[in-house]
Image: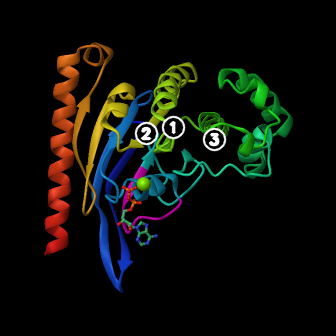
C-alpha cells in the first residue's frame, strides 16, 4: 500500500473576481521510505499542493489517502514545514520543538526527553536554550526540522527548506538531511526549484509544471546515477527541458 496517494486533486483561487485553476487534477502516489523531490518554477502551485496535503486548505475536488485512509481536508497526519521557518522568536529551540506536543496534547515530559535525545542528532545540543535570532540560518533550519519531526508523523512535507541558505551550508544540510531521514525512517516530500538539490537528495524526482499546476514526468535516482557525472548531467538536462517547456505552456495559457 502506498504511504500517500492523491487522486484528481484540483484547486482554484479567485483572481480579480474570477476563479483561476491553480492545480489541475493531480494524481500522485509514493511508497513508504521514499525521498521524493518536486521540482518546478515559482508560481506553479507547489506550495498550494503541499498545503492541500497538509490539510491547511481544502481541494475543490479530489481525494488524499494516507496509509490507505482518506485524509482529504484534515490536518495532523503529515508533518509540514512551510517555506518560512516560522520559529517563534520568543521561544528557545527546545520550546519551539515542544510546540507540536503542546498542540496535540501529548505527554510533555516524554516529548522533552525525546527532544533531549534528538538535539545531538540535529547538531543542536549546544543551542537548546538559544532563541532563533541567536542561531545561524543553517541551525535555524535544523531547529525548524526538529520541530517538524516532533509532530511524530512518518511523512514530512518540506517546502524549499534550504532556499534562503548560502551554497555551502545548503550542501552540508542536504547531506545531513539524507542521513537523518534514513536514520529516523522518514518518508519525505521536498519541494525545491534547484534541480541539483533534487538530484542530490531524491529517490524520485517529479516535475511540477504550471499553469495550472500538473505533475509531469517522474525520474528515479540512485547513488550510481549521482556518482556518474555523464548520467547526472543528462538527467539534469532532461528535467530542465521539462521545467522549461512547462514555463512555455504557462506563458501560452496566460496569453490566451
Ligand atoms: N490564497 C491564495 N489566493 C489567491 N491566489 C493564490 C493563493 N495562494 C497562492 N495563490 C496563487 O497560486 C499560484 C501558485 O502559488 P504557489 O503554490 O505559492 O506556487 P509555488 O509554491 O510553486 O511558487 C500563484 O500564482 C499564487 O499567486
Ligand atoms: Mg512555494
- The residue at which mark 1 appears reads as 155
Q: Evaluate whether residue 190 shows in this view.
A: yes
Q: Earlier in the sequence, mark 2 or mark 3?
A: 3
- Residue 62: say if magenta: yes
Q: Quadrant of residue 74?
A: bottom right
Mark 2 touches mark 1? (CB < 8 Å): yes
Residue 251 percent coordinates (x, y)? 18, 64
- Residue 102: say if magenta: no
The residue depicted at 70 percent of the width and 38 percent of the height is: 135
Disc 2 or disc 1, which is closer to the eye?
2
**Is 55 located above or below residue 133 in the figure?**
below
Q: Earlier in the sequence, mark 3 or mark 1?
A: 3
Q: Which residues are magenta?
A: 56-64
Residue closer to the observer: 124 or 154: 124
Ligand 2 falls in quadrant? bottom left
Q: Would you call the spot at circle 3 few (<14 residues within 10 Å), some (14-19), or many (20 or more)?
A: many
Q: Evaluate whether residue 1 shows in this view.
A: no
Helix, strand or loop at mark 3? helix
Q: Would you call the spot at circle 1 few (<14 residues within 10 Å), some (14-19), or many (20 or more)?
A: many
Q: Quadrant of residue 193?
A: top left
**Residue 105 located left or right of residue 238:** right
- The residue at which mark 2 appears reads as 189
Helix, strand or loop at mark 2? strand
- The residue at which mark 3 appears reads as 144
Marks 2 and 1, how far apart at CA: 8 Å
Amino acid at each position: 500500500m502506498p504511504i500517500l496517494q492523491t487522486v484528481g486533486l484540483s484547486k482554484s483561487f479567485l483572481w480579480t473576481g474570477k476563479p483561476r485553476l491553480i492545480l489541475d487534477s493531480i494524481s500522485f502516489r509514493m511508497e513508504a521510505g521514499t525521498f521524493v523531490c518536486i521540482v518546478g518554477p515559482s508560481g506553479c502551485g507547489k506550495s498550494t499542493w503541499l498545503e492541500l496535503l497538509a490539510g491547511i486548505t481544502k481541494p475543490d475536488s479530489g481525494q488524499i489517502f494516507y496509509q490507505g485512509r482518506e485524509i482529504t481536508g484534515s490536518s495532523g497526519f503529515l508533518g509540514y514545514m512551510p517555506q518560512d521557518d516560522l520559529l517563534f522568536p520568543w521561544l528557545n529551540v527546545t520550546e519551539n520543538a515542544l510546540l507540536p506536543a503542546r498542540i496535540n496534547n501529548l505527554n510533555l515530559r516524554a516529548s522533552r526527553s525525546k527532544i533531549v535525545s534528538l538535539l545531538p542528532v540535529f547538531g543542536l545540543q549546544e543551542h537548546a536554550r538559544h532563541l532563533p535570532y541567536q542561531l545561524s540560518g543553517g541551525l535555524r533550519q535544523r531547529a525548524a526540522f526538529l520541530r517538524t519531526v516532533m509532530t511524530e508523523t512518518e511523512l514530512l512535507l518540506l517546502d524549499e527548506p534550504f532556499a534562503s541558505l548560502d551554497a555551502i551550508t545548503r550542501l552540508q544540510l542536504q547531506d545531513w538531511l539524507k542521513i537523518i531521514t534514513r536514520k529516523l525512517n522518514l518518508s519525505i516530500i521536498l519541494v525545491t526549484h534547484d534541480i541539483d538539490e533534487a538530484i542530490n537528495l531524491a529517490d524520485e524526482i517529479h516535475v511540477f509544471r504550471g499553469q495550472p499546476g500538473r505533475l509531469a514526468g517522474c525520474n528515479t535516482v540512485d547513488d550510481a546515477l549521482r556518482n556518474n557525472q555523464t548520467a547526472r548531467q543528462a538527467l539534469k538536462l532532461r528535467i530542465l527541458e521539462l521545467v522549461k517547456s512547462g514555463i512555455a505552456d504557462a506563458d501560452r495559457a496566460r496569453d490566451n
